Amino acid sequence: MSEFLVLQHIECEDLGTIGPAMSKRGIGYRYVRLFDGEPVPKGLEQYSGLIILGGPMNVYEEDQYPYLKEEDILIKKGMEMGIPILGICLGGQLIAKAGNARVREGAKKEIGWYELQITSGGMKDTGFKGFPEKLMVFQWHGDTFDIPAGATQIASSALFANQAYRIKDNIYGLQFHLEVTAEVIRQWISEYQDELSSLDYIDPDRIITDIAKHMDNLAHHAELFYDKFFSR
């Protein structure tokens, strides 16, 4: 059975819907719980892929979170090996950094349900086959990344020009959260109350209300993406 390594930065941000999608396809996974002090493996020889999840830290906070440096080394090794790699939110930023692209603070935080615009490159991308040009997705981030040299820009939003990219045929970096469930969103709103209370333009009640409008469609398109990504 093939097995992916999963780098987890905080307990409340796990694989979400990715886990069942992998299990359904006979793919195993092993979490590395960085928030619990588990070390970043030195290599990926025994794994068939790598997933890097989100978290509240920033890629440039290596002094505070030393494992970020080790993740950078591991991601570069994965790139050289040519294995499938998926980064979500912070994970997408870490892949961009490993690809020598700039990661920086955005103009304002994007938290809640926002419209994603699939680019012309994204509409031709096999991973996003079946996606409409516009889709409501869930966001929770303040930083942004440049698209690595040679990568294909897949998606953008009104606030953040770069929302997704593909490097070669095997690596995807996503800024938005395809993997969330209704329960996860409620958990994050509870977990990150201090952050939300500092942002007067974010309405947590509205975010929860909008789950009923958008979650089923998001889950459907997440499954389309998983089907293509895990068939690599």
Image (cartoon, rainbow, N blue to C red):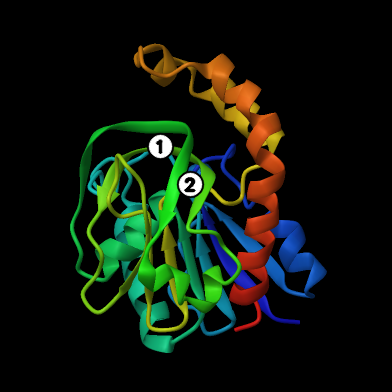
Is residue 202 among what the camera can see? yes
Residue 171, compared with residue 104, is above or below; it is: below
146 left or right, relative to 210: left
Task: Give percent across and percent down for residue 16.
Answer: 66, 48
According to the picture, the residue beneath numbered tag 1 turns out to be 56
* The quadrant where residue 43 appears: bottom left
CB contact under 8 Å: marks 2 and 1? yes
Image location (x, y in percent) of residue 130: 61, 68
Q: Quadrant of the C terminus?
A: bottom right
Q: Disc 2 and disc 1: Cα gap in Å?
A: 8 Å
Give the residue pinned by disc 2.
9
Q: Secondary structure at mark 2?
A: loop
Image: 153 above or below 177: below
Occupied quadrant, residue 65: top left
Residue at 39 percent of width and 50 percent of height: 90
Q: Which residue does the image show at 67% across and 48% down from the upper left? A: 217
Q: Which one is nearer the viewer's eye here, 63 or 52?
A: 52
